[in-house]
Amino acid sequence: MTTRFAMALTAALVATIAAPALAQRAYSPQEERNKAIVLDFYEQGLNRKDFEAASKYLGTYIQHNPNAEDGPEGFRKFIAFLKTKFPQSHSEITQVHVDGDFVVLRVRAIREPGTRGNAIVDIFRLKDGKIEEHWDSVQPIPETSANTNGMF
């Protein structure tokens, strides 16, 4: 067996084995439902700033962001803050990942037009069609980057 042939055969085997890992799996009906709930919650709450429309998706809503209050009332206060302080804020969801009761969003959030905004990872845990817990990690989008990969 020539070296070139062996390398080609190895590459073909690796590609065959890795292909399923690279492909996103199909979501179960429950995962699709969880995804739809979080996406509508995000649109109604964060973009339209309509607490009433978003609140139908809230369960206990345990908040893990140390700057935000727990529960639906804490979320109501956050939406009121956005309406007052950043009425033109908008969040663009760039990626969605679902694993069982967890929905993970990659978000570009712009609080004021003309600014770079923040890159956010939001994690939601659902139970019986309600959002029970929320975690987030927020990172300002810098003017320059040490690489050309981009944040989104």
Image: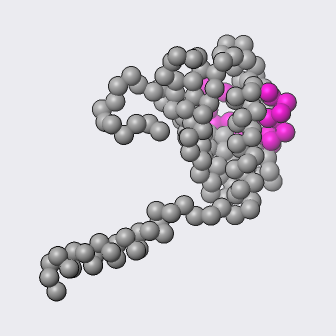
The image quarter containing residue 38 is top right
Q: Is residue 59 magenta?
A: yes
Please give the count of numbered marks on the rendered protein: 0
The image quarter containing residue 68 is top right
> 60 above or below 75?
below
142 lies left or right of 2? right
- Residue visible at 69% across and 16% down? 87
Q: Single out the residue that lies furthest toward the top.
A: 85
96 lies left or right of 75? left
> 150 above or below 118?
below
Question: What colour scheme governs how the chains and residues are painted in the rendered image of this protein?
Answer: one colour
Horizontal and vertical percent position of residue 3: 15, 78
Q: Choose between 113 and 105: the one closer to the eye.
A: 113
Q: Single out the residue that lies furthest toward the left.
A: 2
> 89 above or below 138?
above
Q: Choose between 102 and 32: the one closer to the eye.
A: 32
Q: Which residues are magenta?
A: 50-71
- Residue visible at 59% across and 43% down? 105
- Residue visible at 74% across and 31% down? 45
Horizontal and vertical percent position of residue 127: 77, 52
Horizontal and vertical percent position of residue 66: 61, 29
Q: Choose between 77 and 23: the one closer to the eye.
A: 23
Please say whether residue 104 is visible from this viewpoint.
yes
Q: Is residue 24 magenta?
A: no
Please say whether residue 132 is visible from this viewpoint.
no
Q: Choose between 45 and 67: the one closer to the eye.
A: 45
- Residue visible at 34% across and 72% down? 14
Image quarter in which the N terminus is found: bottom left
48 lies left or right of 19? right
Horizontal and vertical percent position of residue 39: 70, 42
